[in-house]
Amino acid sequence: MRWFQRKGTFSERAPCRHQCGPVCEAAEGAEAAALDAVHLDVGTPPVQGCGIENTCCGLKLEAPDTVGPFLKFWGLQRLGEAAETPTNHMAFKEEQLQGSRVSVEGRSSAQRTQAKAAATAASAAEPRVWLGSVLLVTKAPVEQVVVTMQDEAGNPTGSPLAPTLLETYHDWKAVRFMMRVPVAAQETKVFYGVSVRGQALKPQEGERFHFYIAGYQQPAHWGYYSCSGFSLDVPADKREKYWGGMKPLWEDVKKTHGQKPLHLLVGGGDQLYNDDVWTVPELKPFLDMTRKTPADRATKQQAAFTDTMRAAVEAYYFHHYAVHFAQPIIADMYALVPQVMSWVSACLSAAPRATGMDHDIFDGWGSYPPYLQSSTVFKGIFDLANTWYSVFQQHCSKHEKPMVSIYELGCSTAVVTCDQRHLRLRDQILPLEHYMRLTMLCTNLPVHVRHVVMVFTVPVVYPHIRGGQKILSCVGTECMSGMLAKIGASPMNHFNEPELMDDLDDHWTARSHQEERRFLIEHLQMLSRYRGCRVTLLSGDVHVCGAGHLYSHPSPPEGQERQDYRYMPQIVSSAIANPPPPSGLMRVLEYFSAPGKINKYTSYRMDRIIKNKVGVGKILENKRNWCEVVEHDANDTKFPGFITFHLRVEEEPGNNTTMVSYEYPVAPLQPATPGHDDYFDPRTVTTARNACSCMSG
């Protein structure tokens, strides 16, 4: 297990053999700070120095003068709605929704069916505007950064987009440009131009930036990925020579986009790995503080987050984001496909290394003991991580960042993301107000939306190693940890806490979250039944891929599966870059993958969609992957009204020519009787089966 193998924590490192300065120099006082010229060294080249052993990109953390452009999708606006802003961009108004609702009282079944079909068609054809943004981070003055919409010939259409200054870091400025594009019936190719100081920027391939918008009569084509980086324990030489670095699967994403344009990319968390923020030397005094007694812990909790610490930590986050997002393969995809991103709600990872944690902030944020979680230093680091997460991933200031967002695309699909990290506690994943916001947004969706894809960064249906928390609770005692340390097998992290405890606490099936998991699932079942839509769960983080599902107990009779509103598929896709876990741990997960129950009427199980060479199914695959999602229209001969998830899996490490695809089609929810909003109810399963047997006889 990981806690017997982890080495090289900050306090254990040998002194540097090179005559080099600290990772970042911070003078006393903010006025004397001159961090623009500071280089944060990543990796361990023999001449460059030491400090940080490795990060997700393996590059020197020195931001270019200009980073970007990066695209973000904000949602769709209907004509007549108020002007959208990042803080209320999906606040549907009640009076606009009343017109799309259909009164079915006093009508025959045929009339109800016709009325509903007419309302669905009218809703689908309703004029709407695509809302998005372009982000640039540059040293140029804001007035010298120009973004224009262009036609096919490259000529600007209309006035340049208005800039909004989101944040500054020394000479760098983060500038956002909001876009508004009418949605046509069919796919639209949108061109845009970016110039800085009069110099036009270009993508790595091609002359101009462009992206595609799905038409309201056209099925959407989009993708999902997570864990786009490498954890600290992956050696630099193996990262590049064996795994091929970041490129292999991102090149497959780019190839897929070239064959059939992607309208959206959803980043499910760990868009970069910031774990090594704790190797910044200015934080070492905090790490060295003891935690043995309650007084020690109180002192550590109240320790000051000094100006020197703040300067060093902000330098780390800013430069890391800028360098990581500027890598050619990632920069191209972020400029050519609109993005929707979220940060990870950590969980018990499948990997025995530093995985399954919230790398966008640092290892395990939100699941540490209260004396750490509420400490001044933790809060200070989170504030800076949140600032640059909001800028680079959400294209807004940290005060504008929405906690729950919904993104409608294509003929019949909506994608929902929730911030499962900002207000996280050891006994809470989502606060109650987030559930209320989620309900409001989803129930107010237009009637033509038949699929709601919930992006929960950690799988809700997933094997869980039971008993792990009890073991770690014992390991975490001073006596046991001291005994293990004497034999060279330390189970503790650099906070002197059990290494995997934060992972276990974060999992949806942890003891502290089991009731919230049940509440979440029942909440989504209520939404599915009331709204008449199929709810699908899409998750990553665990560095494996696979699928499972929730379903009614007792299960529906044959032929009624599509009428089960409790049926919710769970797609797991992770990681697009970080290495997968070893086969030994996969056998452990297989052992703990038995079906189970959520409540009296809901069961769950893992599916075996991944087949080996002899056709034997596996619940999970420990290979790098990402997920391609295809929406089908109602006239599709094979999958009418479905959405299909294709797990794109790398068979040979570092070789994207060996990609294989595993298909998981998801049918829309269908009422038991046409024209009515009634669905399969497990309490009537006996009657339903008797009726079926009588009809067949």
Image (cartoon, rainbow, N blue to C red):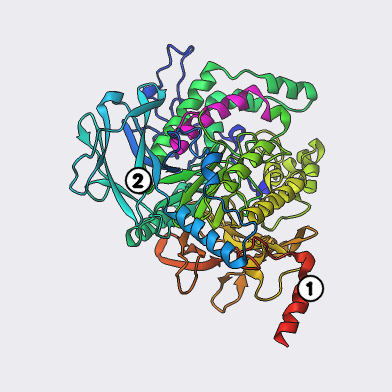
Residue 633: % across, % down: 45, 64
Q: Amino acid at mark 2?
A: Pro
Estimate how packed mark 2 is, as few (under 14), some (14 to 19) or many (20 or more) residues with alpha carbons within 10 Å.
Answer: some
Question: Magenta segment, which residues?
Answer: 373-399
Residue nearest the viewer, comparing 356 with 475: 356
Residue 158: % across, % down: 24, 36
Residue nearest the viewer, comparing 541 with 499: 541
Total numbered labels: 2
Residue 678 falls in which quadrant of the image? bottom right
**Residue at 30% in and 25% down:** 142
Q: Amino acid at mark 1?
A: Thr
Whether residue 165 is visible: yes
Give the Cα separation between the discs numbered 1 and 2. 50 Å
- Left or right for 598, reference 582: right
The residue tagged with tag 1: helix, strand or loop? helix
Mark number displayed over residue 182? 2
Q: Which residue is mark 1?
A: 687
The residue tagged with tag 2: helix, strand or loop? strand
Per the image, is 390 magenta?
yes
Residue 395 falls in which quadrant of the image? top left
Residue nearest the viewer, comparing 213 with 467: 213
**Residue at 70% in and 66% down:** 680
